[in-house]
Amino acid sequence: MEQPQELIINMLNKILSLFKKGDSSLNSFERKILESAASELPSELAHILMARINSINLVQRINDGQEVNCFEMVQRKPILRSSHGFPTNLEEEVFADFTVCINGNTVCRGKLWLVNGVFFSIEYSDNPKYFANEDNFQVHVKVMYKQKK
């Protein structure tokens, strides 16, 4: 169990990370995960996801990189374009699970989240900084999203 001082430091680090500007784009590791997810979707939904990915101009990595939140900023305000959304009635939902493997060994699992149907975040089970620079990784995606009719 963490000591009270460690808990406070961790909490402050999380709060500070929320106020950091972030990066202007996804890194190649994050992009490969999302492109792998798009390849598993029907073409109409893949096009929607790729349009959203290409619109992202602010990426915040929190919890030491284990959560990646993606924004499209217009005039310093985040927006969720309905044209970038999957049909859904849910505010939040996991649309895909993924596994990252290196040399056949699973090094990480994660989830891709929608907010109001729009891709919003990547959530990793483990800190990706230990393997994100590897070139020989494979991504396996299981799409959970069921298109509403």
Image: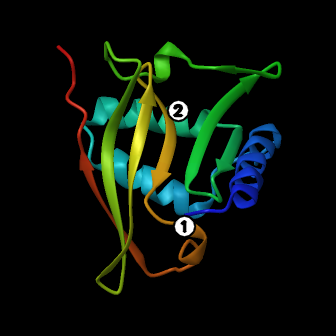
Residue in view at x 74 percent, y 50 percent: 8
Determine the secondary structure under disc 2.
helix
- Extreme residue toward the bottom, this view: 103
Q: Which residue is tagged 1?
A: 128
**78 or 63, which is in the foreground?**
63
Tell me where residue 135 appears, x and y as whole percent.
51, 80
Label 2, residues with CA under 10 Å away: few <14, some 14-19, many ≥20: many
Which amino acid type is shown beneath numbered disc 2?
Arg
Left or right of residue 55, residue 95 in this image: left
Left or right of residue 23, residue 70 in this image: left
Label 1, residues with CA under 10 Å away: few <14, some 14-19, many ≥20: some
Residue in view at x 53 percent, y 80 percent: 134
Tell me where residue 48 appears, x and y as whole percent.
42, 29
- Residue 35 has which mark? none
Residue in view at x 25 percent, y 33 percent: 145
Instruction: Kindly report the distance in space between the C-alpha atoms of the residues bearing marks 2 and 1.
Output: 22 Å
- Residue 52 has which mark? 2
Residue in view at x 56 percent, y 71 percent: 132
Tell me where residue 109 appears, x and y as whole percent.
37, 62
